[in-house]
Image (cartoon, rainbow, N blue to C red):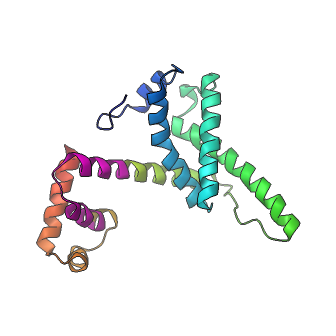
């Protein structure tokens, strides 16, 4: 099984996925991309259950298409391909829900932007957020950084609150905020 501390690159993962018996690699793939797909749907206005359904349908379509040999790396990145599958699943959902809402006299609330660059920006933001969350989990699990230090770091660096505000909110000093930032950045670089 792949260790979380030594994750496979996307290329290595795709090579390993060629073996249909590699359940651990398929599970790692799901663990890596399902949260991104769910968050992508949520950012586009879906309710949690609908976002989870779109993520599931996207992953199932990916499995079918990948096993059928439809993914060609020379035509683009894996993330773009997954986003395209997700977009089609979102459009399917929109069509299903809009026809039900129209029969009840309601408006369809989810409208996908026509501009693919907007969808790409949303996708990229969710990918960055997933990497950051993975880094935080790894930092919490594998280092001597306290939960309080992580909380300080998250507020100051990720949520971009001023050091004074973080210190006041958490009942610590500004110096402690900067030390927490230094410690966490040092551990993340390692």
- Residue at the limit of the structure toward the right, as seen here: 103
In the picture, the quarter occupied by the N terminus is top left
Give the residue displayed 35% in from the left and 52% down from the top: 132
Give the residue displayed 16% in from the left and 58% down from the top: 182
Give the residue displayed 34% in from the left and 67% down from the top: 159
Give how far across and how far down residue 44 sits, in percent: 60, 59
Q: How many marks?
A: 0
- Viewer-proximal residue among 104 and 95: 104
Left-right relation of 146 to 40: left
Left-right relation of 185 to 3: left
Q: Is residue 125 above or below residue 10?
A: below
- Viewer-proximal residue among 140 and 108: 140
Give how far across and how far down residue 105 sits, in percent: 85, 71
Give the residue displayed 15% in from the left and 51% down from the top: 144
Q: Is residue 179 above or below residue 79?
A: below
Residue 140 falls within the magenta-colored stretch: yes
Left-right relation of 28 to 54: left
Q: Is residue 20 above or below residue 55?
A: above
Residue 92 falls within the magenta-colored stretch: no
In the picture, the quarter occupied by the C terminus is top left
Give how far across and how far down residue 121 sits, in percent: 52, 53
- Viewer-proximal residue among 9 and 52: 52
Left-right relation of 122 to 129: right
Find residue 101 and report its image quarter. bottom right
Residue numbers of the magenta segment:
132-156
């Amino acid at each position: 099984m792949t260790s979380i501390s030594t994750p496979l690159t996307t290329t290595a993962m795709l090579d390993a996925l060629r073996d249909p018996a590699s359940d651990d690699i398929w599970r790692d793939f799901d663990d890596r991309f399902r949260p991104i797909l769910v968050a992508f749907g949520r950012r586009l206005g879906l309710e949690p259950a609908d976002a989870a359904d779109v993520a599931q349908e996207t992953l199932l379509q990916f499995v079918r298409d990948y096993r059928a040999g439809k993914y060609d790396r020379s035509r683009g990145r894996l993330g773009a391909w997954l986003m395209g599958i997700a977009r089609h699943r979102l459009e399917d959902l929109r069509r299903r829900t809009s026809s039900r809402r129209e029969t009840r006299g309601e408006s369809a609330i989810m409208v996908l932007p026509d501009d693919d660059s907007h969808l790409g920006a949303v996708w990229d933001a969710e990918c960055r957020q997933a990497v950051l969350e993975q880094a935080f989990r790894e930092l919490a699990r594998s280092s001597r950084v306290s939960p309080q230090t992580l909380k300080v770091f998250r507020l100051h660096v990720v949520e971009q609150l001023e050091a004074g505000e973080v210190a006041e909110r958490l009942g610590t000093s500004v110096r402690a905020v900067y030390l927490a930032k230094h410690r966490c950045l040092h551990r993340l670089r390692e």
